[in-house]
Amino acid sequence: MADAISVRLDNDAQRALMVLEASGLSRSEAIRSALVDAAGRLRERSALAAEVAALEADEADRDEMLAVAELMESLRAPG
């Protein structure tokens, strides 16, 4: 059996819940879905931040980015 919780919703959260319920989800389904989606987005942001940090720490990659930027600048049309 899943844990039951209670929560106080502010106006924005209440409106969002109403939108989810209007799509046909039950109140419980809507809240569970929103929690799982939010956690997934947080994991994705954390993974992206870790990837960016790894790329920033990669000196060879930074050198290549600078070389590409210089090449692109040299190919840019005047004006």
Image: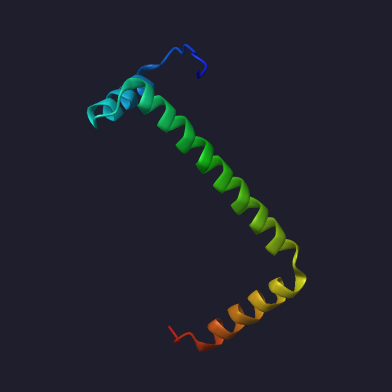
Looking at the picture, tell me which residue is in the foreground, 15 or 43: 43
In the rendered structure, the answer to whether residue 32 lies left or right of residue 69 reads left
In the rendered structure, the answer to whether residue 46 lies left or right of residue 75 reads right
Q: Position of residue 16 (x, y in %)?
A: 33, 27
**In which quarter of the view is residue 42 placed?**
top right
Picture layout, residue 73 above or below residue 41: below
Picture layout, residue 32 above or below residue 11: below
How has the structure been colored for display? rainbow
Picture layout, residue 11 above or below residue 37: above
In the rendered structure, the answer to whether residue 5 lies left or right of residue 70 reads left
Residue located 40% across and 25% down the image:
31
Q: Position of residue 29 (x, y in %)?
A: 37, 26
Looking at the picture, tell me which residue is in the foreground, 75 or 11: 11
> Which quarter of the figure is the C terminus placed in?
bottom left
**In which quarter of the view is residue 11 placed?**
top left
Q: Position of residue 48 (x, y in %)?
A: 59, 53
Q: Position of residue 67 (x, y in %)?
A: 65, 81
Residue located 70% across and 73% down the image:
61
Looking at the picture, tell me which residue is in the foreground, 78 or 74: 74
Residue located 44% across and 12% down the image:
8
**In which quarter of the view is residue 12 placed?**
top left
The mark total stands at 0
